[in-house]
Image (spheres, rainbow, N blue to C red):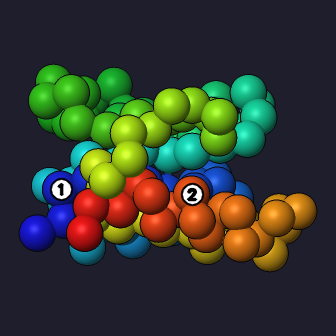
């Protein structure tokens, strides 16, 4: 069962709706590299004022890429648009592997 998803570069990857649909009960954590992208990710996934989802507290947690994410705490790390843009792909893959609960 997927309980926690870490979505790397969530705003640019634009996969949030698909992940939320596929894993509706999973907690999603968006990791964004800049303040502007973190704010855009928060506002994009904020339920509308009239939505019952606002009352449940469900939504997405947004973190920076240097944010201390707990190792071995996620069942899925998703990245649609990040790996090809980093300076050290093997280092990022190693970081993702550490985040996965195996």
Residue 93 visible somewhere in the drawing: yes
State left or right for residue 100 relative to residue 34: left
Q: Residue at x 73, y 27 (%)?
A: 35
Question: 53 and 23: which one is in front?
Answer: 23
7 relative position to 50: left or right: right
Q: Would you place residue 84 above or below residue 86 in this image?
A: below
Determine which quarter of the picture holds residue 88: bottom right
- SS for tag 2? helix
Q: Counting other residues with Cα less than 10 Å from the Cα at mark 1, is it few (<14), some (14-19), or many (20 or more)?
A: some
Q: Nearer the viewer, mark 2 or mark 1?
A: 2
Q: Is residue 31 left or right of residue 97?
A: right
Quadrant showing the N terminus: bottom left
Indicate whether 44 appears above or below 25.
Answer: above
Tag 1 residue: 3
Which x, y percent locates residue 36? 76, 31
Q: Is residue 5 above or below residue 45?
A: below
Q: In the rendered image of this protein, does residue 38 appear above or below residue 98?
A: above
The crowding category of the residue bearing disc 2, from other C-alpha atoms within 10 Å (few below 14, some 14 to 19, many at least 20), is few
Residue 26 position by quadrant: bottom left
Mark carried by residue 28: none
How far apart in space, not on screen, are marks 2 and 1 (Cα)? 19 Å
**Residue 93, x across and y down, in percent:** 61, 69
Residue at left 13%, top 29%?
56
Which residue is the site of mark 2? 95
């Amino acid at each position: 069962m997927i309980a926690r998803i870490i979505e790397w570069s969530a705003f640019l990857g634009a996969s949030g709706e698909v992940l939320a649909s596929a894993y509706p009960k999973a907690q999603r954590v968006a990791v964004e590299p800049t303040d502007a992208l973190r704010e855009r990710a928060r506002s994009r996934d904020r339920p509308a004022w009239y939505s019952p989802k606002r009352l449940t507290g469900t939504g997405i947690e947004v973190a920076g890429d240097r944010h201390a994410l707990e190792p071995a705490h996620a069942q899925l790390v998703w990245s649609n648009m990040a790996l090809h843009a980093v300076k050290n792909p093997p280092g990022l893959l190693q970081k993702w592997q550490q985040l996965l609960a195996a």
